[in-house]
Image (spheres, grey):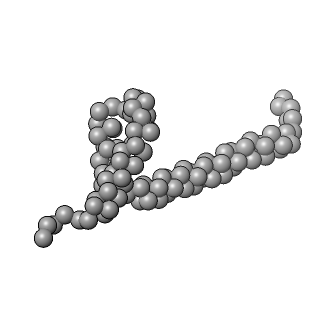
Amino acid sequence: MTDQPPDDVRTAELEARIAELEHRLARGPSADANKSGVEAAFWATMHRIFPDEARKHLKVAGKEQLLAARVYLDRWIERIDHEKTEASERLHEKIDVE
């Protein structure tokens, strides 16, 4: 008896590996052309360690953090604009000094 899986299981495993390689190649070298060696190594490690589904969740979480920062900045800008508007609407009284 051998420890090898049946041919259909082995074929399915190989097809999955080929599909994953084709997926990586579809992103192409142009996607990595602007990355430093360290950054490329980091992302290669991320792809090896984290499954696709985990990376999708991390990407969504990162987007949510940026959206939260946008809300914070928008409120801060609105407050500054409001203070400017209030300051410009104040009535100024001219006082003559003798």
Q: Position of residue 47 (x, y in %)?
A: 34, 49
Query: Viewed as shown, does residue 81 lie left or right of 6?
Result: right
For residue 50, what is the image quadrant?
Answer: bottom left
Q: Residue furthest left?
A: 1
Visible residue check, residue 50: no
Residue drawn at point x = 26 percent, y = 65 percent:
6
Q: Position of residue 12 (x, y in %)?
A: 35, 58
Front-lying residue, 35 or 83: 35
Front-lying residue, 81 or 61: 61
Query: Viewed as shown, does residue 96 lie left or right of 65?
Result: right
Relative to 25, residue 59 above or below = below
Q: Position of residue 39 (x, y in %)?
A: 33, 38
Front-lying residue, 10 or 32: 10
Visible residue check, residue 64: yes
For residue 10, what is the image quadrant?
Answer: bottom left
Residue drawn at point x = 36 percent, y = 45 percent:
21
Q: Quadrant of the C terminus?
A: top right
Residue drawn at point x = 48 percent, y = 52 percent:
59
Total labels: the figure holds: 0
Query: Viewed as shown, does residue 44 lie left or right of 81?
Result: left
Residue drawn at point x = 44 percent, y = 59 percent:
53
Q: Quadrant of the N terminus?
A: bottom left
Front-lying residue, 63 or 73: 63
Q: Position of residue 73 (x, y in %)?
A: 61, 48
Query: Viewed as shown, does residue 96 lie left or right of 24?
Result: right
